[in-house]
Image: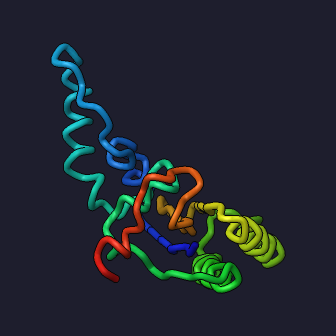
Amino acid sequence: MHHHGYAWVGEKKTFDRESIRRPPGQAPAATSEQEVHDRYREAVAAFPTADLPPIQTAHWLMKPPSLIRGTWEEPKEAGEWLGFQLAEFAPRFASKQDREVTRLALLVQSAVERVTWGGDVSLGHYLKGAVFHSVALVACSPNRAAHDLPCPARQSGA
């Protein structure tokens, strides 16, 4: 088993567009409201390639391999990457509490423990202004929450 790292920074209003953060699912019935059809069409078009974090962490594995920021076999190495991501953005975190070094160290320690047993990690922080930062470590081959999802890196031959 290995873990892939994903990161995203963008406008909070973009992050809030849930229809493109979910896989399309089953097509709506012909009698469904137009809004439902519009959301479905948007999800079909945008979800597969959008770099937005999916609602379910495991669904990162449905995204293109180009969105993978790193791959690690060792939990400690995945945790180091996560720590670097948090440290890079911590000065911009909107909450003073979220910027505390001890809190960040505990987040990384907890993430390493979770990755060790094959779990996923997904963290998000509001940055100053209307910006959101998301970072995730996703178990691959297999993923506990979505056993049927293939490794995106192996699909591309990477």
Residue 84: x %, y % from top left: 62, 84
Which of the two residues, 82 or 62, is positioned nearer the viewer here? Answer: 62
Residue 60: x %, y % from top left: 43, 60
Residue 90: x %, y % from top left: 64, 76
Q: In which quarter of the image is the N terminus?
A: bottom right
Residue that extends furthest to the left in the rendered view of this protein: 30
Q: Quadrant of residue 43?
A: top left
Q: In which quarter of the image is residue 80?
A: bottom right
Residue 154 lies, with reference to residue 11, above or below; the image says: below
Residue 132 lies, with reference to residue 99, above or below; the image says: above
Residue that extends furthest to the top in the rendered view of this protein: 31
* One can see residue 96 in this view: no
* One can see residue 105 in this view: yes
Residue 88 lies, with reference to residue 93, above or below; the image says: below
Q: Answer left or right for 30 relative to 8.
A: left
Which of the two residues, 68 or 35, is positioned nearer the viewer here? Answer: 68
Residue that extends furthest to the right in the rendered view of this protein: 102
> Residue at the location (53% across, 62% down)?
142
Q: In which quarter of the image is the C terminus?
A: bottom left
> Residue at the location (56% across, 82% down)?
72
> Residue at the location (52% across, 55% down)?
57
> Residue at the location (50% across, 56% down)?
58
